[in-house]
């Protein structure tokens, strides 16, 4: 529990420093990175200790939720350290801390973790990486929409100073989507290769929604390449695809594990 508190406190400290950095000089604003790194490392240790105690990687609902939050925080920190979109942490770090607290409060499940061989664990890890990356893309899309709307209305808020120029933000969005799309493709391929019986494992609905999300992201990338889609069009497609993906993974896990009390 100590590691959980350390991670949450440093996530919140990083968030506070980022907010403060929007109103101060860049040298002061860079201090958020140290707090974020400590928070992410403590988050990693929470799961490492849990896996060691349980004898395997826990992939149940709250554990998966926390791991996605960890992936989002790690990606945000790495991108932010490169000098781009550190402001995303104002949203991501509180989310990651909330997901971690839910995992700590709701306990662990080990039966599914012990039953997974290396192939299914590879599939699960690819899925978590894909969801984390594309969740960051969805947040970037929302920020892009807010930035465009503020500029159209000539509302020059202070938080706009924390965002990169519109073109740079849009470029980062599509790079993130492209990376997430590759990971999602690998997730679907490993699912096809390694999951023996979709019907027996109650995975049909998850597969259908994941494929629909993959097709939507793919259509967006093709539209960007072929027709130059951008702005509100890109935002809409990104958010629709992400909703499908959330329903595919967390929606199905919520129903099966928490409502029907079945393993996935």
Image (cartoon, rainbow, N blue to C red):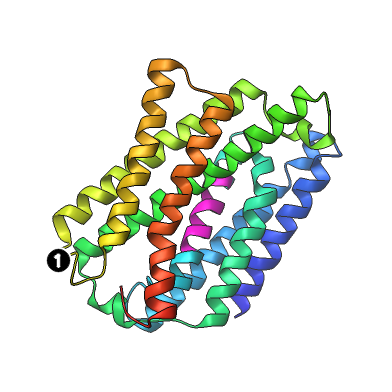
Asked if residue 240 lies left or right of residue 77, the reply is: left
**Which of the pair 98/209 is nearer the observer?**
209
Q: Kindly give the residue lying farthest to the top in the view shown.
A: 227
Asked if residue 253 lies left or right of residue 105, the reply is: left
Name the image quarter holding residue 54. bottom left
Residue 7, horizontal then vertical, whole percent: 62, 66
Does residue 99 sit above or below 50 in this rendering? above
Does residue 255 sit above or below 154 in this rendering? below
Q: Is residue 203 magenta?
A: no
Task: Give neighbour class at mark 1: few <14, some 14-19, many 20+ (Cα, 10 Å).
Answer: few
Residue 176, horizontal then vertical, whole percent: 47, 36
Give, as a single range, the part of the protein colored magenta: 67-76
Instruction: Name the chief secondary structure element in magenta.
Output: helix
**Which of the pair 228/23 is nearer the observer?**
228
Secondary structure beneath dot 1 equals loop
Residue 137, horizontal then vertical, whole percent: 52, 41
Name the image quarter holding residue 161. top right
Please identify the quadrant where the N terminus is shown.
bottom right
Does the rendering let one see residue 109? yes
Q: Kindly give the residue lying farthest to the right in the view shown.
A: 23
**Which of the pair 27/185 is nearer the observer?**
185
Disc 1 target residue: 197
Please identify the quadrant where the C terminus is shown.
bottom left
Does the rendering let one see residue 81? no
């Amino acid at each position: 529990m100590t590691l959980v508190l350390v991670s949450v406190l440093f996530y919140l400290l990083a968030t506070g420093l980022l907010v403060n950095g929007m109103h101060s000089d860049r040298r002061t604003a860079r201090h958020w990175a140290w707090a974020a790194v400590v928070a992410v490392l403590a988050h990693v240790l929470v799961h490492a200790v849990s896996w060691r105690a349980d004898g395997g990687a826990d992939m149940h609902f709250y554990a998966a939720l926390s791991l996605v939050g960890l992936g989002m925080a790690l990606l945000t920190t790495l991108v932010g350290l490169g000098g781009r979109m550190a402001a995303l942490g104002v949203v991501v770090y509180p989310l990651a801390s909330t997901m971690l607290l839910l995992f700590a409060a709701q306990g662990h499940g080990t039966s599914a973790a012990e039953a997974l061989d290396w192939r299914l664990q590879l599939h699960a890890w690819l899925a978590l990486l894909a969801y984390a990356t594309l969740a960051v893309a969805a947040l970037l899309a929302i920020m892009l929409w807010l930035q465009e709307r503020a500029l159209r209305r000539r509302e020059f808020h202070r938080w706009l100073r924390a965002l990169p120029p519109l073109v740079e933000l849009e470029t980062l969005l599509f790079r993130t989507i492209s990376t997430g799309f590759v990971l999602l493709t690998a997730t679907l391929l490993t699912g096809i290769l390694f999951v023996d019986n979709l019907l027996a494992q109650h995975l049909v609905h998850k597969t259908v929604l994941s494929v629909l999300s993959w097709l939507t992201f793919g259509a967006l990338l093709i539209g960007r390449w072929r027709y130059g889609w951008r702005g509100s069009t890109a935002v809409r497609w990104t958010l629709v695809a992400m909703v499908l993906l959330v329903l595919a993974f967390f929606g199905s896990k919520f129903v099966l594990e928490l409502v029907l009390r079945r393993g996935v």
